[in-house]
Image: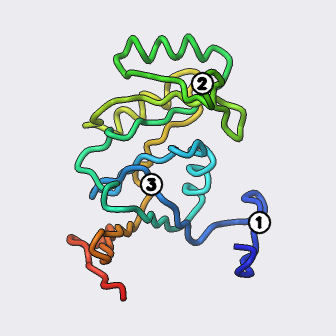
């Protein structure tokens, strides 16, 4: 961005963000997504919620019918995190702490841990989002629901599919 002359500012110094362009780990045609595979889900969600528009750019392998094949990141405070882990395990959510190397727990930019949930499918993402958000010790989850307005899908044949909320069918864009 700096090389292109784009000014970088701290989020708290701006009144609004017109547009956010980002990737996603998984996305449905209903514009639901999982993000946070890189570990910055809390910061990504704060930026997305402060933006007027959000565009995701993904490869065709990231488009799914139902969320959940990609592990769902859940950012949790350190204090009591093992008790929370056991609670998630008892709920059948197949948790695992994200690690750095073989024995160190991954720490987010905010000093929290990430517990990844291996769910396979998330048939009711709004319900799960609500339950996770209301779990003591959970800071944020990687379900990005009702955030994305548009997503672009790069395809192996070199075309791009453009999905927009206000259009029933995606538009194909030819790239030369």
* Label 3 environment density (alpha carbons within 10 Å; few <14, some 14–19, many ≥20): many
Q: Secondary structure at mark 1?
A: loop
Query: Residue 27 vs residue 88: left or right?
Result: left
Of badges 2 and 3, nearer the viewer stands: 2
**Image disc number at residue 24:** 3
Query: Residue 65 vs residue 148: left or right?
Result: left
Q: Position of residue 56 (x, y in %)?
A: 44, 63
CA distance for labels 1 and 2: 36 Å
- Pick whichever, 49 or 106, lies toward us: 106
Q: Read off the residue under disc 1.
A: 9
Q: Residue at x 25, y 72 (%)?
A: 170
**Image disc number at residue 102:** 2
* Label 2 environment density (alpha carbons within 10 Å; few <14, some 14–19, many ≥20): few
Q: Position of residue 8 (x, y in %)?
A: 75, 68
Q: Quadrant of residue 110?
A: top right
Q: Residue at x 33, y 75 (%)?
A: 160
Of badges 1 and 3, nearer the viewer stands: 3
């Amino acid at each position: 961005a700096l090389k292109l002359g784009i000014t970088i500012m701290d989020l708290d110094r701006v009144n609004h963000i017109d547009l956010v362009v980002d990737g996603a780990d998984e996305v449905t045609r209903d514009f639901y997504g999982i993000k946070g595979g890189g570990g910055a889900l809390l910061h990504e969600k704060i930026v997305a919620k402060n933006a007027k528009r959000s565009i995701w750019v993904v490869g065709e392998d990231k488009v799914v019918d139902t969320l959940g094949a990609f592990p769902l990141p859940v950012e949790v405070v350190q204090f009591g995190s093992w008790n929370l882990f056991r609670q998630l395990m008892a709920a059948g959510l197949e948790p695992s702490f994200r690690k750095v190397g073989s024995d160190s727990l991954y720490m987010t930019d905010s000093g929290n841990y990430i517990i990844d949930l291996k769910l396979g499918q998330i048939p009711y993402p709004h319900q799960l989002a609500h339950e996770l958000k209301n779990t003591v010790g959970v800071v944020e989850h990687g379900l990005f629901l009702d955030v994305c307005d548009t997503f672009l899908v790069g395809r192996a044949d070199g075309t791009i599919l453009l999905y927009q909320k206000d259009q029933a069918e995606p538009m194909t864009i030819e790239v030369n």
